[in-house]
Image (spheres, grey):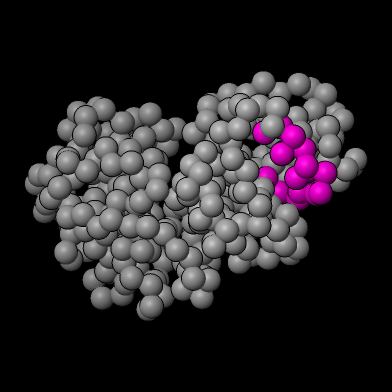
């Protein structure tokens, strides 16, 4: 079969022949239709991600959409190594296959599943959002953050505050459900004052896609201005702004901030699959919007370095 194949550690995959996978007890063989390019897929392919398998050669692609042998359309996640989603066929544990709603097309489903799950799982499984609460999304101008705005509103957030550096994209978030936007490109004092104002008015949940300096400012503002003993669930999801922060111990002693992460390892896999299924079933009713760019799998090498932060590149097999 044809597939995207990583032949050397850290190298971009090439379009080449690869061994054909076969089904087994509890393992489904899938004729792949679409598989999205993502930061996680590229990180796993390079060996840098904590969940990388480390086998060479292999096919990248942590998820995708396709058909089972009986013709059932499914979304699948975490194929069995060395077979990934960026191939004509892959094999996946049957429990990791989710039936697709009839109205949801393959490209959109492949593109939206992982970034949509990141906020759905964080809000439902980790933060346990209550209807009417204010949700602040730090880093809302990327694909995941834009979906987080829409999903937070769909799940009942009373108010959504979105932060980001891209002024044009930031202003477009109001149409997706953001009530307040904060430009992270402001000087530190102005930005800190903007954060303080938001926390004074009350924030129940923070979804943080950035970490780094802006997370430090958010935590400092929450410590100084949030109402005493009122919990703020700060959920760490991504680290585009930096991998570390400096956190004074007094920030935790003098506030009701609850720090937690959301991702593989912090949520049991069956519940992550459940979050994906719930989100996929809500995509059409919720009118969730995501920008996609379908690309033939044969062009994998040329598009491997596409920036997926605003438009999701989705490799298609034509299957």
Give above or below for 132 relative to 207: below
Residue 197 falls inside the magenta stretch: yes
Q: Residue at x 37, y 78 (%)?
A: 102
Q: Position of residue 52 (x, y in %)?
A: 37, 35
Pick the front one: 53 or 102: 102
Pick the front one: 105 or 128: 105
Q: Can I make out residue 129 in this image?
A: no
Q: Position of residue 96 (x, y in %)?
A: 41, 59
Q: Residue at x 53, y 26 (%)?
A: 243
Q: Position of residue 139 (x, y in %)?
A: 55, 42
Q: Is residue 90 left or right of residue 167?
A: left
Q: Is residue 305 left or right of residue 233?
A: left
Q: Is residue 39 left or right of residue 134?
A: left
* Res 309 quadrant in image: top left
State which quarter of the image contains the C terminus: bottom left
* Res 25 quadrant in image: bottom left
Q: Can I make out residue 40 in this image?
A: yes
Q: Is residue 102 left or right of residue 181?
A: left
Outermost residue on the bottom side: it is 102
Q: Residue at x 48, y 49 (%)?
A: 169
Outermost residue on the right side: it is 228
Give above or below for 274 relative to 232: below
Q: Residue at x 34, y 52 (%)?
A: 312
Q: Which residues are magenta?
A: 191-206
Pick the front one: 124 or 221: 221
* Res 235 quadrant in image: top right
Count up the numbered dots: 0
Main secondary structure type of the part rendered in magenta: helix
């Amino acid at each position: 079969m044809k597939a995207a194949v990583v032949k050397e550690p850290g190298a971009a995959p090439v379009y080449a022949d690869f061994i054909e996978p076969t089904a087994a007890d509890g393992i489904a063989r899938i004729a792949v239709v679409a598989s999205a390019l993502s930061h996680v897929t590229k990180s796993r392919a390079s060996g840098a991600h904590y969940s990388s398998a480390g086998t060479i050669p292999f096919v990248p692609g942590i998820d995708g959409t396709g058909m089972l042998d009986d013709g059932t359309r499914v979304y699948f996640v975490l194929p069995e190594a060395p077979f990934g989603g960026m191939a004509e066929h892959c094999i996946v544990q049957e429990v990791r296959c989710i039936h697709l709603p009839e109205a949801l097309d393959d490209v959109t489903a492949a593109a939206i599943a992982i970034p949509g799950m990141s906020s759905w799982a964080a809000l439902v499984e980790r933060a346990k959002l209550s209807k009417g609460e204010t949700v602040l999304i730090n880093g809302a101008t990327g694909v995941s953050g834009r979906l987080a705005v829409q999903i937070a509103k769909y799940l009942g957030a009373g108010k959504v505050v979105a932060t980001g550096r891209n002024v044009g994209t930031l202003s477009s978030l109001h149409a997706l459900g953001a009530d307040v936007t904060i430009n992270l490109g402001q000087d530190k004092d102005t930005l800190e004052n903007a954060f303080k104002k938001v926390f004074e008015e009350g924030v129940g949940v923070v979804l943080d896609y950035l970490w780094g300096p802006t997370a430090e400012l958010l935590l400092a503002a929450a410590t100084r201005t949030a109402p005493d003993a009122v919990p703020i669930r700060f959920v760490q999801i991504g680290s585009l702004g930096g991998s570390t922060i400096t956190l004074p111990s007094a920030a935790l002693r003098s506030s009701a901030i609850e720090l937690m992460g959301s991702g593989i390892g912090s949520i049991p896999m069956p519940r992550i699959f459940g979050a994906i299924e719930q989100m996929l079933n809500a995509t059409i009713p919720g009118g969730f919007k995501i920008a996609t760019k379908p690309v033939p799998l044969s062009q994998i090498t040329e598009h491997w370095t596409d920036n997926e932060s605003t438009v999701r590149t989705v490799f298609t097999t034509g299957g």
